[in-house]
Image (cartoon, rainbow, N blue to C red):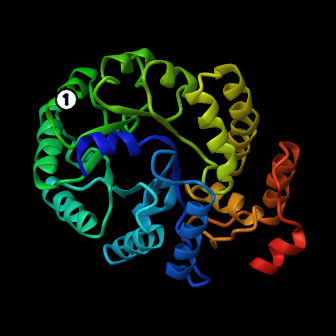
Amino acid sequence: MDRTELERIIVGPIATVPTPFDDDYEVDYGRMSELTKRWVSEGLVKGKAVIKVAAAMGEGPMLSDEEWPSLLRTVVRAADDKAAIVCGLHYKDTKRTIEDAKRAEALGANALQVCPPIFNLPSQDDLLDYYSDLSNAIDIGIMVYHTHWMSGGLIDVDTILKFEDISNIVSLKWSNPEGVDYDEMAKFSGFLNVIDNGGDVIRCHELGGRGYINLTAESYPAHDLKVWGLIESKKYDEARALMDSVDTPLREFYDKISARSGGQGRLKKGLMALMGQPVGSSRPPSKPMNEEEMDGLREVLEGIGWPVASRAEVAAAR
């Protein structure tokens, strides 16, 4: 897939899809296949959205080196070339990242979300070498995940500007580090598909951005597809109001439940269950949402008008 096509499809709401687990915390590949077909049928298709597999909110770091390739294979086959598939790769050195990248490429991923090798405590030159060596080893796209809040994850804007010379880097997840203005992204949005990661979705688009990370695209695709449609039409006030009406209460709720147990997939799995598409619990030590938390989430969703499954339907699906 050439760069022009990658730029066309790495856009819109990025659905960081949860990994389904059974009661023994084993990956439920059959369920993942069913869900992928559903996501495609509900509009998470090329040019409108991205399905991101085995990323952090999808519990990718908790998957073994046997599990994540099987999960990716399942999604690619079920999507049947109708969706843009991005696979998350996490915090490994150059050699092992290239090995993983080649596996993902062979399995049909369109692109990779790749974190900096934080445990190597890289310098800026190390980061350029890392992404350049990775790009030279594969023929699919790279979305750089700028994890600047982690030691070793900061990528200077001057370094990002040099990504223009690395052929397979087509996208970057952007949130601004402390001391860096959000609008600095305008310096590189002309050659990268910038994906907002928690700053300001509307401002990102105004500055040339092409998508955003969210909590909701896989649980209720209609919502985020509507938000993105409004953004693309530059109906920014309407888009912001719609997005804030959902995102603000959900993030407040997420902060509240995180005090009892961590885990990036817990809220997404609660959302899926209440929308009638259960995917099991997160792997320990993360704890599933309890009944009180589920009732609180139900109240949030009903308050924003989502078509939540009944309690009987949720209980029957568990």
Q: Residue furthest bottom?
A: 24
Q: Residue at x 28, y 22 (%)?
A: 157
Q: Is residue 284 visible?
A: no
Q: Quadrant of residue 73?
A: bottom left
Q: Could you say where residue 131 lies in the image, as x and y percent from the top left?
A: 18, 43
284 or 44, nearer to the observer: 44
Q: Which residue is mark 1?
A: 164
313 or 176, nearer to the observer: 313
Is residue 242 rendered to the left or right of residue 7?
A: right
Q: Could you say where residue 111 lies in the image, as x and y percent from the top left?
A: 31, 53
- Vertical relation: 46 (above or below) 145: below
Is residue 250 rendered to the left or right of residue 137?
A: right
Q: Name the secondary structure under disc 1.
A: helix
Q: Quadrant of residue 173?
A: top left
Q: Residue at x 59, y 36 (%)?
A: 228
Q: Is residue 190 visible?
A: yes
Is residue 317 rendered to the left or right of residue 7?
A: right
Callout 1 amino acid: Glu
Quadrant location of the C terminus in the rendered image: bottom right
Q: Residue at x 69, y 38 (%)?
A: 247
Q: Could you say where residue 63 lies in the image, as x and y percent from the top left?
A: 41, 70
